[in-house]
Image (cartoon, rainbow, N blue to C red):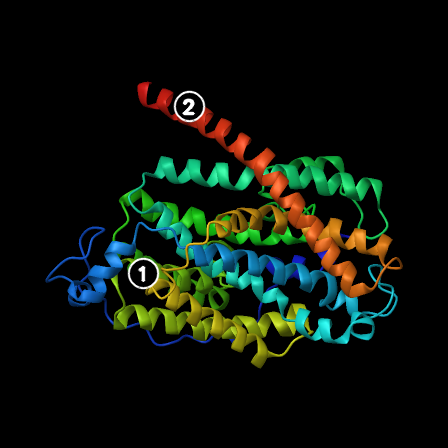
Amino acid sequence: MSMQGTESGTAASQQFPGDSRHALPALAALAAPPADGRPSAGAHPSTVTDTGARAGSRAGRRLYAIDGIRLLAALLVAVHHYAGTRRVDQPGNLIWDRPASDIMPTVFRFAAYGWIGVEIFFVISGFVICMSCWGRSPKQFFVSRVIRLYPAYWFAVLFTTSVLVVFPSVWDSLRTRDVLFNFTMLQSGSGVMNVDGVYWTLWSELRFYLLFLAVVWTGLTYRKVVIFCCAWGAAAMLAPIAKLPLLELLANPEGAWYFIAGLALYLMHRFGQNLLLWGILAMAWLMGQQELGARIDEVEHVSSWRGAVLIYTVFLLIMVAIALGATDRVQWKWLVTAGAMTYPLYLMHYAAGTTAIHHLRDTMDPRLLVLTVIAGFMVLAWLVHRFVERPLAGALKRGLDTSFAQLRKT
């Protein structure tokens, strides 16, 4: 049984029907934006209000609430994979042996919507990437992404492969050459299977980074990010109809509008709200609800469109509140650690976790088992962050900084 057969693992390779994305009216003409990264009097009226001034003063602060939401999204995905997918609800499935809806019906009804944690990740990624890149050079952007993504990912590939080799009862391990290729994180672009099905989201993230790097290269400004949102949104809208593989690869129509929502939210946070940004966010919501429906129909099959849209809408409203400063007083230091655990938890929980459930399913109540497995992976995620990510990130940063310094000298 291959990892590519999982509900979430196939989402990246799904080809959505071309007729499900009709051309939408163009966004309103761009208002005159600031010429630099600061609110500008006269150029953008909304940014010179008290709200805009307060937004500018908040731009450099850490948003602890987002760290908490990131961990919550990861936990939603984990609960979904353990107790809410179509796979675990099949009779005789290898994970529980019985339909999850029979052995824990209440948990199943809740967990069936946990897949939306991935869309939450994408929105937060658009927000955080724009925030962390403002005022940085392309080199700094590249280095920050490498040291953030690869250390935990390399460990996860080794960890998951080891678990699947020792306990091949639920998932088959890949060939050695495919496992080695997974270390590049580029396997989805080369037709090579993922060691763990959850890695499909990394391919969407990488394509977003590649596109946004072009904007970072020219220097981030309000105007450039707004134009990027509109241009990328138009490409994502047209790609399925154009049926041009390269355009669809770059436009990433399945994920683009979630990232765009995050970018618009960050601009609200930095410059204050205005009609144009609300328009981009509204368009992102409209396109996003369509993608949610397509994913339910073609991949998940366990939840309703109305429920998914309600959860996504509530999340966006919470993000609006965060962007506009409603959660500025939330400064709980433990949320920083919670946010740091999110990435390794997400990378390691699925294949190894469902394998653990397979072997332990008869030892305790299934609800307690789900909680126990999640708690175990949270501890493991903290250990990976503390003893793998932090040391390796420091070493990688020093090495890359030295390498780029040599490039400048030659």
- Horizontal and vertical percent position of residue 342: 57, 51
Residue at x-position 38% and y-position 26%: 404
Identify the image quadrant of the C terminus.
top left
- Please tell me how crowded label 1 is: few (under 14), some (14-19), or many (20+) other residues with Cα within 10 Å: many
Picture disc at residue 137: none
Q: Secondary structure at mark 2?
A: helix
Q: Tell me, yes or no, if residue 223 can be seen here.
A: no
- Horizontal and vertical percent position of residue 217: 31, 42
Between residues 390 and 125, which one lies in front from this camera angle?
A: 390
Left or right of 152 on screen, residue 58: left
Between residues 292 and 163, which one lies in front from this camera angle?
A: 163
Hey, which quadrant is residue 98 in on the image?
A: bottom right
Residue at x-position 42% and y-position 23%: 403
User: Rounded to the nearest whole Å, what is the CA distance between mark 2 and mark 1?
Assistant: 35 Å
Identify the image quadrant of the N terminus.
bottom right
Q: Amino acid at mark 1?
A: His
- Please tell me how crowded label 2 is: few (under 14), some (14-19), or many (20+) other residues with Cα within 10 Å: few
Q: Amino acid at mark 2?
A: Ser
Residue marked by disc 1: 269
User: Is 18 located above or below residue 36 in the figure?
Assistant: below
Residue marked by disc 2: 403
Residue at x-position 75% and y-position 49%: 352
Left or right of 79 on screen, residue 104: right
Left or right of 337 on screen, residue 212: left
Left or right of 95 on screen, residue 16: left
